[in-house]
Image: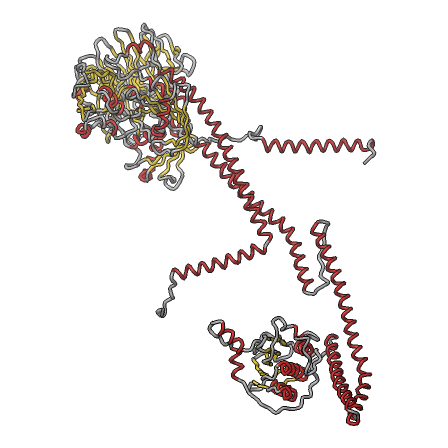
Amino acid sequence: MRAEPPVRGVTRVQAGRRRAVAGAAMLLLCGGCATVPTSSIPRASREIDGRDTLSQPYIRMIATPPRAGALPEDVLKGFQSAMASFDDPALDIARRYLTPAAAAKWNPWRETRVYEGKIEWDRPPDFTKATRAVASIKGTVVATIDPQGSYRSTRGSLEQSFSMVKVQGEWRIDSAPDVRLLSADDLSRAYRKVDLCFPPSTGYPGLVVDRVWVPIEPSRGVAETVIRRLLAGPTSDIAGAVTSAFPRGTDLNRITVEGDTVVVDLTAAAETVPSESLDAMKAQLVWTLGDLVTGRTVEIRVNGEGFQDSTLRFKPSDYARFDPNVLGGSPPSYYLQSGRLYQAKADKGGGAPVQGPAGGQATKYDHPAVSGDEGRPQVAARVTGADAGVYVTDMAKDGQWREWIPGKDLTPPSWDRYNSVWSAERAGLQQTRVWAAAGGQPQKVAIPEELATSHVLALRVSRDGARVAVVADDGLGPGIKIGTVVRVGGQISVQGLYTLVDPREDQKIRDIAWRDAADLLVLSEGKNGQELTTWSVMEDTTLSDPAIKFDATAKIESIAAAPGQVLAGDKDGTVLKYDIDKKDSQVVAKEGASSPVYPLG
Amino acid sequence: MPAPPGRRRRRTPGQIARGVRRRARRLGGRLRRVWRRSLQLRVVTSTLVLSMAVVIVLGVFLMQSIIASVLQASDLAAHEESRANIATASGILTPPPSEVADTSPDAGSAISSGDLVGEAAQALADRSGGRYDVVIFNDAAVGEGRASGTIDYRSIPAAMRVKVRASGEYPTLTRQYATLRYLGSRQAENGIIIGARVNGTYEIYHLFPLGEEETTLFWVQRMLIAAGAVLVLLLAGVASLVTRQVVTPVRLARQAAERLAAGRLEERLKARGEDDLARLATSFNEMASNLAVKIHQLEELSQVQRQFVSDVSHELRTPLTTVRMAADLLYESRDDFDPMAARSAELMQNQLERFESMLADLLEISRYDAGAATLDLESVDMRAVVLRAVGDSEALAERQATRFELRLPSEPCMAEIDSRRVERILRNLLFNAIEHGEGRDVVVTLAADRDAVAVAVRDHGVGLKPGTESLVFDRFWRADPSRARTIGGTGLGLAISREDAILHGGWLQAWGSPGEGSQFRLSLPRLAGAPLKGSPLPLVPPEVEMRRTWRGHVTPVLTPAVSAVAEGVVRIREGVEEAGADAG
């Protein structure tokens, strides 16, 4: 077209179209060339990382075989580090530090000893000429761990001597004690503290904690080691009180993470689990793995396939009722004020009298205890005077005080989760009887002679009903003993008694309280004033950081504890609530308030 | 080897190998043939090969650069991480000055010197969050080796440790790719190890697994291979399509050319478009039409010539009759003339006769050219036809002192023929044989099989020169132009005979060899119109064939036809009669 003016409009349209086409082409070209998209449709994000999220990073000792021409000191140090290496399950490298004869008979499996100390040489040796040398490790034994994994802290000096000889020009250890010696660093590096959970042998839907220390085998990882230890069964301390829900012979094939699901692959024996134990089995798994499975889904498979021809998949939160600590995050708390039992309000101070006779003033009682029945809790209290004994009433309008345990000199009552009220009765000067009453019928508990012949000052049954803590004075002063509650048939007995807190001079134990399944709070009064210590019952040790520090001047009379919080009643009639996480306290009640109580414990 | 009955004969490995080789050779031959014949296949194959080479080269280059860039990124990240970590570890591993003073070698050495290595390792492991692993060695002290996670510290190659130990202090990093092995069930994977020497004797190694990168690269590689394969196949497909577009018109043109060659002059190509192929088709069509026009013109020309010959022959007959009558008159009264005039009359008579027969032959042959010749078919015994023809030739034979040797079958040989024409063929052949037989025996053989009959006439004269076997049937052809015609043939006899044989759907063929004489064979189908597939008699006389075979030291093979002929030979010696043939 030659005539330009008339086609101006057309040209504009054409130019626009051309520009649009060019733009589209550019867009396509850029889209094709762009490597990272500049935008996209929002979609649910998936976990694409196949990393082992079950194991936190941890450090291993590298065992090195003895070097040629090493000095005796280095040989001994090398032997020690080889003992601390868990890369080498049979300790073959450690054995290479021994003379062949010693290596053949050395058996380190019987006991593991944790020590703090140094190597000392008997005399300043001239190693170039000598053919024999003796070195000893001197220090203190901190703890022992038996093959089952039970940790017992001990206080004792350690003197372990190693005689060394020259074999073919190389120094070797001639005699080594039949013990695996680990330093505290080695322990914290190679061991993990694990709370194994087992259902009680009574069949009650709950779990009992069995705390063990297990060495983490590098080839297995934490989760697998823990599950294998769980399948191996409870330690002998608690073996009478619990039973494993896993059928005998169950073994672990592997434990893997698939996206958000932790897959536990068991051997075929797992399928023989009776249906009534299945929940307990799942709960055991979930609570033993604890943090490793929190927020995830757990799936049990048998030899890589479904469980009993279906998929067995569950969430840990579904098994919250199996909590071995029994009490949840914010349990109800109670206190006594002017002869009435009050239930504290959740956040604000103050409280309201509970329903039933416990909230009235008709009967004078002290040391109330509240049962764990959430719907219709019961209150047990000690009544002194003419009709002395432990009385129980429902926390309801129609409740009536009924005497469950008669007796003059009874310890404050303590509930266990089988709705039994426990109390120890002083029958003579050095004679004690322990009662457990269920439904108003007192039953004598079989107790070891050791306990029967001592003066029991206080008795607390743990919330899981598997252990009992006793403040007993056997003449040397008050100490704390822990026993395992075994219920066989209708009989209740306390077995496996051991001393948690040794009696000490000028130490008075004011009160004890179970904080959770494993920890016992001990309020003691010594020269330095009052002290609240947390004892790990199953490790026989105090936790290094005290949960709460009281004023040294505070006169705390009684304590009650639940996971994460502590109630303390002082002499001035104030009840304080301490929050362990927030590390602060708040007044619950003032003026004549005392005897704070959490359910059970 | 006698095989036991009821069992399949087992073939030896050699036989099997031979069989396989034979089959392979056959297949190879077939492929070669296809290869030679198909332009498309050749183009597609070469495209395939070339594009494969290009794709492989490009793919390798591409893969190399992708690997380099992917690894470079993770390499860089690993370096950064290691550098930061090693700085941290170096800080941890430097003991506080007070403690340095405290640790004298003589004093009871501390078993746990605060476990600085453990602390450092833990710090690094915490930082790693499981993404990589850390291994620390200290060869100067005992029990100072640490590893994180489940890494097998033996993954670090010994050569690398030597290098690290020999290298400078921290800022120098040593790097190596290696396979990282793990304790337990975790799969080994390839990764990068970065090592450094810190605080004198500490060696810190960071082991970064590159499993994800490996997987990525593996998939990229897979995709590249798949894409390359698809590309090559696509290219082959495209080549195939394109060649097809070119080859199809060419093939059509070839077919058209073949049809054109077969005589279908109306054959044309379809020309579509204006491309090269369309122009080829147009040119082809032009060529075809030009050819057709030329051929048509030539046909017309030859038609005119034939017509002219025919007309001339006819026109010559009328004056010739008059001349003939006058010549007859002169010839009958030659005794009254003086000897010179009498001789002239005789000569004239002779030449007139020859002229007449030539004219007859010309007319005959122009009938053939005009396609006016028809067959007068009847079922006759060929023996009788042969005997009649021999009888007609007896007189001439007598004159040439030639004897006939007849070999006829004992049973009748019935055939549907035009006996007049066949007799004429035989007479021609016999006259020819007598003329060139130089007085030697002439052998006449008759044989028949289910479909055909054949007569062979053999002479033992000078024979034919090689290459002249087919020329003998040409019109007015002469073996030796200097030689005079003794019998006075017109030079058209064999041509006419050939036309006769073709009219019957038969063959007339000649064989000759210098010094061995010649043989003419007439083969005819027994039923008129049936196609002739073979002849009951050999073209080359059996004795000649046998002699040649002997000379060649080859085992003599008697052809079945020879033996069949030899069975039914009948020798006939008959009296000589005056011949009254039309031509020689």
Q: Nearer the viewer, residue A29 or B248?
A: B248
Task: Identify the residue at the far top of this view.
Answer: A553
Residue A507 position in % (x across, y down): 24, 10
Tell me the residue at 65%/51% (across/down). Answer: B246
Tell me the residue at 67%/88% (across/down). Answer: B579
**In-image side of A210 versus B356 (left or right):** left
**In-image side of A16 versus A244 (left or right):** right
**Quadrant of the image occupied by residue A195:** top left
**In-image side of A580 versus A1 (left or right):** left
For residue A282, above or below residue B29: above
For residue B191, above or below residue A403: below
Residue B113 position in % (x across, y down): 29, 15
| Quadrant showing the N terminus of chain B | bottom left
Residue B88 position in % (x across, y down): 40, 17
Q: Nearer the viewer, residue A29 or A350?
A: A29
| Quadrant showing the C terminus of chain B | bottom right
| Colouring scheme applied when the structure was drawn | secondary structure
Task: Identify the residue at the far bottom of this view.
Answer: B336
Q: Total of numbered circles in the picture?
A: 0
Tell me the residue at 72%/63% (across/down). Answer: B265
Q: Is residue B90 visible?
A: yes
Q: Is residue A391 visible?
A: no
Residue A12 position in % (x across, y down): 76, 31
For residue A16, above or below residue A431: below
**Quadrant of the image occupied by residue B197:** top left
Q: Nearer the viewer, residue B123 or B496?
A: B496
